[in-house]
Image (cartoon, grey):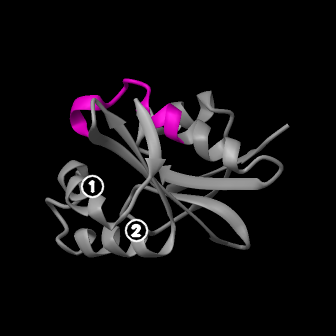
């Protein structure tokens, strides 16, 4: 496994592994925007992009992981944890936030294993599925 900064050349690979693109064609444009604007990391397995993470610093001036996506074939293999750990290492001494739907049990468990704690809830983003906000601070 290799983690590196993503570039525009990775756009086709990120679109291919993103499970939301199939239901929302605007997601491909969003991924392209992320590549151009924010810190985007990819995790490669045998030279192929298998996961990505997007972080920005526009959440009340704090770091925020906007997206963590692992390809269907590589879920629960440690790639998500490795990307989170890399971001956590890059955010030493800073506040780091992220969020996920309450219904996303695997992501919630991953965040808790990585030391994130629940920080709040945002209602009404997705019908009947609140967004759970998580917080992490090193040390």
How packed is label 2: few (under 14 Cα within 10 Å), some, or many (20 or more)? many
Q: Is residue 13 magenta?
A: no
Can you say which quadrant of the picture contains the N terminus? top left
Quick check: marks 1 and 2 in contact, CB under 8 Å? yes
Badge 2 marks a residue whose secondary structure is helix
The reply, left or right, for residue 52 in relation to residue 60 is left
On the image, which quarter does residue 33 sit in? bottom left
Q: Nearer the viewer, residue 53 or 120?
A: 53
Q: Which mark is residue 14?
A: 1
Residue drawn at (24%, 69%) of the image:
28
Q: Nearer the viewer, residue 3 or 99?
A: 3
What distance separates the C-alpha of mark 1 from that of mark 2? 10 Å
Residue position for label 2: 35
Q: Which mark is residue 34?
A: none
Looking at the image, residue 36 lies above or below residue 80? below
Can you say which quadrant of the picture contains the C terminus? top right
Q: Position of residue 129 (x, y in %)?
A: 41, 55
Q: Position of residue 36 (x, y in %)?
A: 42, 74
Q: Nearer the viewer, residue 100 or 94?
A: 94
Q: Is residue 73 magenta?
A: yes
Q: Position of residue 19 (x, y in %)?
A: 23, 51
Badge 1 marks a residue whose secondary structure is helix
Looking at the image, residue 44 lies above or below residue 26? above
Looking at the image, residue 123 lies above or below residue 83? below
In this view of the protein, can residue 61 be seen by the observer?
yes
The reply, left or right, for residue 40 in relation to residue 13 is right
Q: Which residues are magenta?
A: 69-83
């Amino acid at each position: 496994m290799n983690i590196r900064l993503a570039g525009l050349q990775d756009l086709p690979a990120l679109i291919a592994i993103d499970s939301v693109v199939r239901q929302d064609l605007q997601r491909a444009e969003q991924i392209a925007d992320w590549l151009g604007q924010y810190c985007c990391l990819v995790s490669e397995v045998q030279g192929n992009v298998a996961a990505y993470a997007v972080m920005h610093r526009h959440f009340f001036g704090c770091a925020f992981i906007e997206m963590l996506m692992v390809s269907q074939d590589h879920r629960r293999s440690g790639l998500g944890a490795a990307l989170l750990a890399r971001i956590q290492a890059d955010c030493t001494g800073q506040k780091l936030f992220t969020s996920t739907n309450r219904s996303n049990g695997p992501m919630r468990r991953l965040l808790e294993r990585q030391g994130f704690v629940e920080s709040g809830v945002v209602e009404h983003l997705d019908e009947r599925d609140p967004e759970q906000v998580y917080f992490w601070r090193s040390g």
